[in-house]
């Protein structure tokens, strides 16, 4: 797995945040990086004609200030876990991992990573929204893998500490990372939900490039469980393949036998699904992807497996997972 230390030879910094405390701390971690001052991150991040796949081989870092739109309504294709006020926030754009199915390659023309350092403004917006709604379900690792980059920005710890002050705030941090932070001296907050995306090792090696192995992810989950955390498991996307039933049956058995089942909060399941516009861009960026070349079908602007295959996937997954967790903990989300 490639470390983020091998990236970020150049750091673009908006003039406005050059002296921001978080900018300074991040730049200190890369003493050999070339620092380039810019007026607006969009001048570097949004120009057309960029090659996402090419930039992914050597990503650059962009430090900027987010000026508006701190919270967004959760997408319909995402599981809300029965929370009414479902939002996500994007203070990091793009990811160090390189998954074939990741929608980010369909969203952005650039693979470089943007960090909005003005986290205090995000906190203020969350507090304003909480005054209106009293409760809030917020996904904070929506356009990135936040935990994987914690060594750069320390935002996970900052959000955890912030969440302690707001009992009406429920946060989900989704990750494929194997990173473990020491929160043993912090009060446990059940409303800060750690969620791991897990895939069979063969799927991970083929379609989740640069990510930790399944074994390493499970080891990380166990360590978080030992700190008292109940973990959300996300089998998403479940991918149709040869010997599907056999492979996924063994995969689920391995996962659940490796973890403390008493500290599994719930389980989320979804299949491949992506908007029509994003998939078109993804196929153009990643022409050699076996996954993206599959003949998915489009319904209401979203590409996924044919309904017959989706039914087979969900029937098998539900039958298998019910052997390990109670059915009320199982959320059959994206897909059908």
Image (cartoon, rainbow, N blue to C red):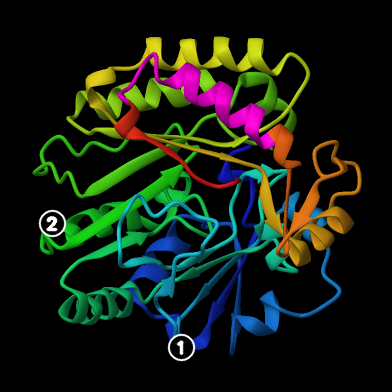
Location of the C terminus by quadrant is top right
- Asked if the residues shown at circle 2 and circle 1 are in contact, with their CB atoms under 8 angstroms apart, the answer is no
Which residue has dot 2 on it?
Answer: 164
Badge 2 crowding class, 10 Å Cα cut-off, few under 14, some 14 to 19, many 20 or more, is some
Secondary structure beneath dot 1 equals helix
| Count of numbered badges drawn on the protein | 2
Residue 72 seen by the camera: yes
Q: At which x and y percent is residue 254?
A: 48, 11
Asked if the magenta segment contains residue 319, the reply would be yes
Q: At which x and y percent is residue 262?
A: 22, 21
- Residue 16 tag number: 1
Vertical placement of residue 326 versus 333, above or below: above
Residue drawn at (43%, 62%) of the image: 26
Secondary structure beneath dot 2 equals helix
- Label whose residue precedes the other's in the sequence (2 or 1): 1
**Residue 258 appears in which quarter of the rendering?**
top left
């Amino acid at each position: 797995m490639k470390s983020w230390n091998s990236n970020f030879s150049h750091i673009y910094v908006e003039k406005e945040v050059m002296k921001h405390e978080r900018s300074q701390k991040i730049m200190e971690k890369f003493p050999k990086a070339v620092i380039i001052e810019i007026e607006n991150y969009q001048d570097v991040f949004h120009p057309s004609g960029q090659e996402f796949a090419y930039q992914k081989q050597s990503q650059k870092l962009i430090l900027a200030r987010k000026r508006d739109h701190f919270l967004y309504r959760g997408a319909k294709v995402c599981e809300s876990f029965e929370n009414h006020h479902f939002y996500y926030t994007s203070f990091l754009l793009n990811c160090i991992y390189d998954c074939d199915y990741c929608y980010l390659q369909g969203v952005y023309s650039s693979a470089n990573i943007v960090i909005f350092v003005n986290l205090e403004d995000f906190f203020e917006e969350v507090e304003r929204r909480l005054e209106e709604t009293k409760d809030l379900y917020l996904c904070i690792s929506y356009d990135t893998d936040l935990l994987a980059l914690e060594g750069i920005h320390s935002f996970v710890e900052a959000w955890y500490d912030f969440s302690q002050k707001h009992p009406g705030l429920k946060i989900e941090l989704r990750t494929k990372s194997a990173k473990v932070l020491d929160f043993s001296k912090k009060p446990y907050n059940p409303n800060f939900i750690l969620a791991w995306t897990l895939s069979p090792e063969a799927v991970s090696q083929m379609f989740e490039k640069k990510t930790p192995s399944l074994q390493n992810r499970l080891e990380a989950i166990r360590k978080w469980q030992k700190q008292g955390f109940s973990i959300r498991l996300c089998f998403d996307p479940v991918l149709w393949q040869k010997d599907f039933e056999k492979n996924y049956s063994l995969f689920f058995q391995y996962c659940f036998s490796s973890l403390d089942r008493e500290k599994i909060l719930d389980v989320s399941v979804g299949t491949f699904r992506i908007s029509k516009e994003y998939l078109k861009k993804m196929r153009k960026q990643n022409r050699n992807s076996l996954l993206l070349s599959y003949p998915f079908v489009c319904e209401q602007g979203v590409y996924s497996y044919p309904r017959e295959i989706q039914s087979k996937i969900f029937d098998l997954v539900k039958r298998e997972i019910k052997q390990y967790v109670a059915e009320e903990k199982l959320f059959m989300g994206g897909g059908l």
